[in-house]
Structure formats: structure tokens, C-alpha cells
Image (cartoon, helix red, strand yellow):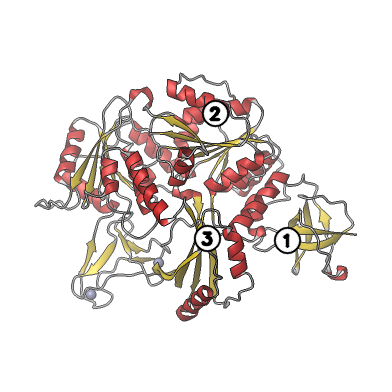
Amino acid sequence: MQRVFVLFPVALGAYEYLTDLPVQVGQFVSAPFGKKKALGVVWPQKSTEDYPEEKLKKIISVLPEPPLPEQTIHFVNWVAGYTLAPLGAVLKMALNAEMGKVSKKPLVFMPPNPDHTQIDFSPAQLKAVKAMQALKNFKVALLDGVTGSGKTEVYFEEMAHVLAQKKQVLVLLPEIILTTAWLKRFESRFGVTPALWHSALTPKQRRDTWEAVRNGSAQVLVGARSALFLPFLNLGLIVVDEEHDPSFKQEEGVLYQARDMAIVRAKLADCPIVLASATPSLETYTHAREGRYLHLKLPERYLGAQLPETRIVDMRKKEKGPVLFISKELKEALSDRLSRHEQSLLFLNRRGYAPLMLCRACGNRLQCPYCSAWLVEHKGSHNLQCHHCGYTMPTPKECPQCHEKDSLVACGPGVERIAEEVATLFPEARIAQITSDTLTHPQDFLALMQQIEQGDLDILIGTQVLAKGHHFPNLTLVGVIDADMGLAGGDLRAGERTFQLLQQVMGRAGRESKKGLALLQSYNPENLIINALSQNDRTAFLTEEMTTRKLLNMPPYGRLASIIVSGRNQLATWQTIQMLAKKAPLQKGIELLGPVVAPISKLRGKFRYRLLVKAPKEARLQNYLHFWLDGIKIPASVDMRIDIDPYSFF
Ligand SMILES: [Zn+2]
Ligand SMILES: [Zn+2]
């Protein structure tokens, strides 16, 4: 009889078992777990022999499947150690839900053909291609180029190079629903579609794709952040496109930043990793500038397309008239485009009609019953919605507080309200609203793209789903309704995110021979970020932001971890965070900020507080947190989460 550890895909650690079966690390086994039996993985963990043998349960059977690859096991261990998440919770991300079942007719993934098409590269592209092909082992490369500079073609070429060596490629993209355009380009370059990994796959598709990655028959896998945990057999390259995108940070379950973990994964595979962006994150940019990453620049727009001319519209100079949210200058630009049969895009990162409903009679503001947040009016679906918890209620005819009839007024604009205003200004224009409310399926997106390309639409009004790299040749005007939105609040990355998002949106204008125009409506035209945007001066913004972060020892010059407690009992929750703060050990260089109330102090019925731990870059933050928090008892009604490298706190 030997003692082995088995890890189950649940939020716990590994448990010790006895077996006389021949087992090896990584093998799938069935073992008693609580009152049931469950599927687990034999885990490399040394026995301390201190648990009495007669109390150990026996493994029931060993599954015939090949073991989980060693690199995947190392990766699971690494991510759990870094994020302080339970080992089994990380393992769960590396398995498919139907382990042990096999398909009678599995999906077949056709091998991509590296020589399917040949491309004429610009000198800058060629230089980047050559520099990448020279990489043999682990190295991070930042592929840094403005929208339309041809980054995708460059990393496709590196993918072809790696495929020719019979190795696998993983491509991480921010939002899979937006990848239809990307997939078309892939198909025309490689002649086939790649294997996909995203939340909309059926259990069978997941199972077959998982197996195809494990046995190497899926050579290129394209997916959202969780694709990182697939059991690659022979990984030769990772590409993280739009590396700055906030959706790479997982904010539920295991809290991790997929871009950062992708770098760890590439290191384990000893292969290169390409981070591509037109607006790199400050972290990545700093590493590249200081020489730790290879910095590959694509300065020009491919085929000589020009960057749009950009102007700030000072919204403090109020204009008279019924028009509320669209300035005279933007209105004229829109009218000009309509007469020339060119397309325009109006950007406002807020779904719905109005962000706040206010009673004219008593001043009551309609709030979510479960969150400390306003209810957003959605005229399209005739209801009020909480954008934080999903609560909806029919739009009331009277104020719920004072019962005055027709007293509720909508305050501020959302996309629906802008669309209404545009329809009043230009009754003949063909308008489309584009938000996550209107695009629920990849098919919707494809249909919309076609409508835009065929010129069936004049004015697009939408949220950030429109910001990503789509190519609209006839779109020559971008109007940002509220450039200041997103700058408010104390979030560390608020400025960075606003800059990245708006620069991407503005890049939608004038991508081919026609010169574009971008108008930024602002009540704060002196703001540094608004100015840097208007002058297309990324360096000015990055330099300023880096200086500030350095001064404050904030990431990437220092490290952060946040401890969030939440619970339905406000007092117990508050007392818990205060108790935690009191027990924090003193350590040179480590600072405790807070506790503070969360900006949305109540979310889904739970009160929330945060402690922020700030540490020098070289500090062993995880060790410190273990030393502090291990063994502390938290009331059962209170939930505690640790977020290493937190991104947003709302
Ligand atoms: Zn009222
Ligand atoms: Zn809510």
C-alpha cells in the first residue's frame, strides 16, 4: 500500500489516500470524497506520514485516460500559490466538466496551413517578424502599434513559424463574442478555423476541445482567459491580443490576471509570448521601456492610412436649444457625414436611457433594493435595471415614495437617449444602437458587421463593445459624448483605462484612404488625459502616469493586495475587517490602507469593506498574507476574499 495525494476540482486542498494500484502523478482516479465518490487527480505532494494509515480511505479505481501533463500541474500549483486561491479551485479551471466521458464521434480540428497565403509586409512589420522568429526560448515581446498598423498579420506570421515546427499556439482574446472578424482573418491566412474555447461551448464541444489540446491535434487554440488552463502538450507560442484589456482580469472565483499568468505559462513551456496592443498597459510598457521585454514597434498605419484629426469640444459653453447631449460642432460633423454618405460612430460607455431617475415632487432617487446604486432606465425594455446585480422592475408610473403621478424624470444620458436625440436631429438617418443588450450572440455581431460594411447604416451609437479592432472602411467620424466619464473616482487605473478606451474608439475613424475626425466632448478640456488624447500623444500620458505611480510606489513600482470582506450583517462585517486590521503584523515597507467602505457599499444585499496592502516590489507579499491571515477565525456570516494585484474596486 502506498500513500498518495488526490486533488479534487473543488475549493479545497489535496487529500491523502491509500492505494495498491499502480498510479502516477497526474492520473485521473475515482476516490471516496465525503459521502460520495468523486473524480480527482493524483497530485505531487509529499506525505508527512503523520496521519494514521488506518484512517486513510482507499482509491477506488484509476481511469484509463492519459495523465494531466506535468506543465499543467506546475501551472495549477503556481497560480494557486500566487493568488492564494484553494488548489482545487484552480484545478477546476484546468479540467472540463465531463472528465472521464468520451465522444463517440469527436470533433476534428483541421491542421492550419502555415503557407496558405503570403503577405506583403511593410518594412516595420518585416522587422518585427524577423525579431520574433529569432526568439527560441521564453521571452516576452510587446508588439506595440497603433490601430490599423497590422499587428495581427505580424503575429500570424510568428504563429506560422511555430506551426511549421509542429508546436501548439495559444491565442488569448478579450471577448470571444467580438472575434468573428478575427476568425475571418485567421481563416484567410491559414485556410481553416482554429479550435475555440469560451463559455458558450456545449459540454461535448468542451470535452472534445480539451482532449484535442491534450493530445496535440488542436494546433491553434483561440480563447478567452480560461483557455490558459488547458492541458497543452507542446506549447510553442502564446499571443495575448489587446493585452491591456480589463477583461483579462477575472473578478470572480479565482481572482487572477490572465495576461500575467500567461507569462508564467510561457515560462513553464519555455516559449515566447507576444503581448499585442495599440495602447499597452502601464505594466507592460514599463517592462518594455526598461528592457525586460522585447519592444517591437509598428509606428505607421498599414497601407498609409492616417490617424484621425482630433478636437476637443468644450461643453462648458452651453448652447441654447432643445439639443442636450450633442454639441453644435458634433451635430454639424454628423450632418456633413450624412451628406457625403459616410458613417459616424457616437460613443458613450453607458447602457440604457438614463443613469438616474429622480422624482420632481419629492426628490426621491430610485435605488436598487439590493445595492447602493441607482436604477438605470431602459426604455427599450420598459424597465429599470441595476447594472450591478441585474435586478429589474417595470418603470413605475408614479413615484414609489410620494405617489405623485408622472413625476419621475430621467437624468443624464445613456446610449438609448443619445439615439433618441440623433433620431430627432436626423430623422432620415439609419441608426443602430450597439450595446451588450442588443448583441447577445456572436451571430448578432456578425450580422451587424455586415450591415455596417454594406453601408446599410449611417450612425452607430454604442458602448465599449464598439471599441475593439473592427475595420469599418467608410467610417470617418467618431464622437465621444462624454470624454470625462470614467475619470472620476479614486480608482488607480481610472486614467489609464479612459485613455486606452478612448484612444481605441477614436482609432475607428478613417482607417483607409479617407481621413477621419474625432470629436471629444468634455467639461474638463484642460485635463491632461483629454489633452494627450486630442494630440494623439501617448508618450505624454504614459510619462505623466509613470511619474505619479513611481512617486506613490503604486504598481508597477510597488505591489498591492486587497482584502475584501462582505456580509449581510453590517456590524459583524465591519467588526471583522477592523479585527483583521488590528492583527496585521508590522513589517518594514508594508503599509496598510483602510479599512474603507466600498464605493458601492452594498452589493447584492451584502455590505462590503476593504483593506489595501501596499508593499515594495521585492516584498514577499504572499508570505506576509499567509503569516497574517492563516488561522484567523472569521464569523460564518462574513466572507473574506484576497485579491492579489487588484484592478478595480467598486
Ligand atoms: Zn416622489
Ligand atoms: Zn443591484
Picture quadrant of residue 457: top left
What residue appears at the point 49 percent right and 43 percent down from the top-left corner? 176
Q: Is residue 26 shown above or below 372? A: above
The reply to whether residue 154 is visible in this rendering is: yes
SS for tag 3? strand
The reply to whether residue 189 is visible in this rendering is: no
Residue that badge 1 annotates: 14
| Circle nearer the N terminus (3, 1) | 1
Residue that badge 3 annotates: 643
**Mark 1: which amino acid?**
Ala
**Mark 2: which amino acid?**
Met
Cβ of mark 1 under 8 A from ligand 2: no
Which of 501/207 is in front? 501
| Circle nearer the N terminus (2, 3) | 2
x%, y% of residue 71?
A: 69, 44
SS for tag 1? loop
- Disc number lying in front (3 or 1): 3
SS for tag 2? helix
Residue 566: assigned label:
none
Q: Is residue 153 shown above or below 285? A: above
How far apart are the alpha carbons under marks 2 and 3?
Answer: 34 Å
Q: Residues within 10 Å of mark 1 (few under 14, many from 20)?
A: many
Residue that badge 2 annotates: 132
How far apart are the alpha carbons under marks 3 and 1?
Answer: 22 Å
Picture quadrant of residue 621: bottom right
How far apart are the alpha carbons under marks 1 and 2?
Answer: 40 Å
